[in-house]
Amino acid sequence: MSSIKMRISAAGDVLDVKSLIEHPMETGRLKDKATGKIIPANYIQILTVSVNDKPAVEANLSVAVSKNPYINVKVPGKKGDKVTIAWSSNIGKSDTATETA
Amino acid sequence: MQSNRRVFLKGSMAASAVGLAVGAGLLTPRAVMAAAWPQKAYDTTGYEESLKDLFGVSGVTASKDVNVKAPDIAENGAVVPVTIESSIAGTDNIAILVKGNPTPLVCNFKFDGAQPFMSTRIRMGKTDDVIGVVHAGGKLYSASKQVKVTIGGCGG
């Protein structure tokens, strides 16, 4: 199961891409209540949105972005184009998902 | 402090690994750009510093052409919806900053053919201004919107 959910609506030559990504976005400032240890930071650093494999948006995120990030961007494209969202985190994890508009 | 140092070490190790990959011709310059997270800009606690680290320019002009949409009152500082749109020609980067957060820079979106529009949800520690900074033609423009936070997003 991909961590990335996407909804694309096409309007003329613009694709409105709304996406929800399942990720804890741990800040590294919170303590685990059971153990009293600090939960290490774990957050998405880079997120790219590409249309037909051409990057359109490159975002840098930080710990100040909410848990399970919601991202909405407007990329160039039309119905039938392939939209790919990819992310990578500070601990080296990554995920990618592609959907057809 | 300790954890900062750990993160920094990890970051520099990753950077050198990328360097090796470039040397070996494994990555195109495009992919390298995507791999670099501006660690310094996101780690600084100063507003001006983070902008300078991120864009390499200082001095921000307030502009009506930057539109920051955020709620007047956020019941939960952990989830504050923010939308920023720019009608300045040549906009290639939009950043969100909150001065009162431990590190002011929240996120930045670089546009490559996409519309200068972004919407996301951010964390805020307390009542503060959400500042949208737009990079266009080598200059910085900003607009802000105050959000009253009743429950902070940084505590446990």
Image (tube, coloured by chain):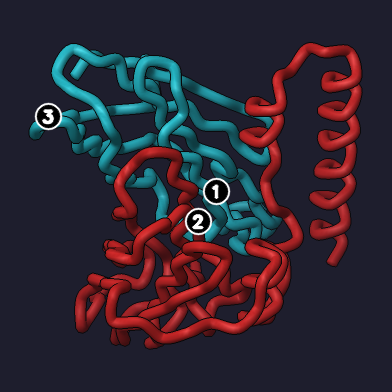
Chain colours: A cyan, B red
Q: Position of residue B104 (x, y in %)?
A: 57, 74
Q: CA distance from mark 3 to mark 1?
A: 25 Å
Q: Where the N terminus of chain B falls, by quadrant?
A: bottom right
Residue underneath mark 3: A10
Is label 2 in contact with label 1 (beta carbons under 8 Å)? yes
Which label belongs to residue A60? 1
Q: Nearer the viewer, residue B83 or B153?
A: B83
Discs 3, 1: same chain: yes
Q: Quadrant of residue A43?
A: top right
Chain letter of disc 1?
Answer: A
Q: CA distance from mark 2 to mark 1?
A: 5 Å
Q: Nearer the viewer, residue B62 or B48?
A: B62
Among the two numbered marks 3 and 1 on one chain, the one whose residue lies closer to the N terminus: 3
SS class of the residue under badge 2? strand
Q: Residues within 10 Å of mark 1 (few under 14, many from 20)?
A: many
Residue at image point 25% right, 15% down: A81
Residue underneath mark 2: B108
Residue A92 visible in the displayed image: yes
In the rendered structure, the answer to whether residue A70 lies left or right of residue B23 reads left
Q: Residues within 10 Å of mark 2 (few under 14, many from 20)?
A: many
Chain letter of disc 3?
Answer: A
Chain letter of disc 2?
Answer: B
Residue at image point 45% right, 67% down: B134
Image height of A80 relative to B2, above or below = above
Q: Position of residue B109 (x, y in %)?
A: 46, 51
Q: Position of residue B5 (x, y in %)?
A: 87, 57
Residue at image point 82% right, 13% down: B25
Could you tell me the amino acid type at mark 3? Ala
Q: Position of residue A96 (x, y in %)?
A: 45, 20
Could you tell me the amino acid type at mark 1? Asn
